[in-house]
Image (spheres, rainbow, N blue to C red):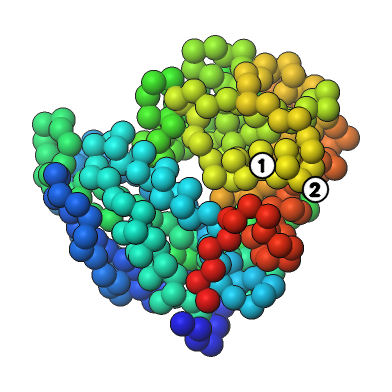
Amino acid sequence: MKRDLQKIDWDNLGFNPIPTRSMWKGECSAGDEWVNGQLIPYGEISLSPASCVLNYGQGIFEGLKAYHTQKDRIVLFRPNKNSARMQKSTERMCIPVMNDQYFMDAVTSTVKDNSDFIPPFGKGSLYIRPICFGVSKAIAVQAATEYVFMVFTSPVGPYFKVGSKPLHLYLSDKYHRAAPKGIGNAKAIGNYSASLYPGSMAKSKGFNDMIYVHAKNEKIIEEMGAANLFVLSDGELLTPKLGGSILDGVTRDSVITIARDILNLTVKETDIEIDRLLSADEVFCCGTAVTVTGVGKISTDEKEYIIGNGNFGEKTLLIKKKLLQIQKEEIDDPFGWIHPLV
């Protein structure tokens, strides 16, 4: 599986798509099972302008990473969780549900064939993007009859280009990311389009990203456009509870487990009021793309709030350290999260 590494500037990777050798493509009709698929050269795809995904947004995706670890092997991190979440998302979006074996075969085949694009140990990771969408033609609002599943990859570095600085986030109730009982708990493509305008507006004002409030109760927070949130307050680690509009993040679940079982912190999944967020000792966000990233400031339209002392919090750094050590096999994996490929 191993080849000589590609000639890429590994020290200056961003979070942008870099073409690799190949990608997986499978096809399925409504009512059938996912059984067919193969690696094809990485490249463009064609769609009808009447395709269901273009007209009605019937598509979902996942995001996971492959790492070149300290043990000089390639591993995936908790791919079973991504597979399980993809099954829930596809069911919610009326897309044929694929079994774990098909998902894993597609992901592992794509990673192995592009192993020379995986950054060296300590230089980044290979981002893996499984995506599934309806391709049959539709003008009436309806689910597609034909679907495509693809997996492509890209070597990546940090998601936020802030170097060693903690994030400065913007909190506002002018926009909602998702509504309870909608599709906010599915990794649906439409969820992310809803955050594009407010996110770009926040970034144009110098903020790194946006914090959204709950659509039904604007006094409590939900998450960011592409990450879950955690708050350390009064000795407790808090994160917004799942309730139909918050994504059940794989990194979120990993952080909860590490905080409880390794750091012996009291962790609560609960409603978090804005006042408690703004007066917190530490705040951080987490996700596959952002890993664990500390927040130093949060601004509203009225005021700028310094979180803690404005730097990375002690518990934030400990949680991030333990997570990365497990992912890179710098310490033994106590939870069975590592899935080695070689």
Q: Is residue 171 left or right of residue 105?
A: right
Location of residue 303 by image quarter: top right
- In the rendered image, residue 61, in percent from the top left (x then y), is placed at 38, 48
- In the rendered image, residue 100, in percent from the top left (x then y), is placed at 36, 54
**Mark 1 and mark 2 residues within 8 Å of each other at the beta carbon:** no
- In the rendered image, residue 138, in percent from the top left (x then y), is placed at 12, 39
Q: Which mark is residue 257?
A: 1
Amino acid at dot 1 = Thr
Q: Which residue is mark 2?
A: 318
Amino acid at dot 2 = Leu
Q: Residue 10, can we see it?
A: no
Q: Nearer the viewer, mark 1 or mark 2?
A: 1
**Between discs 1 and 2, the one toward the N terminus:** 1
The residue sitting at 42% across, 43% down in the picture is 85
Secondary structure under badge 2? helix
Tally the numbered discs: 2
- In the rendered image, residue 205, in percent from the top left (x then y), is placed at 64, 35
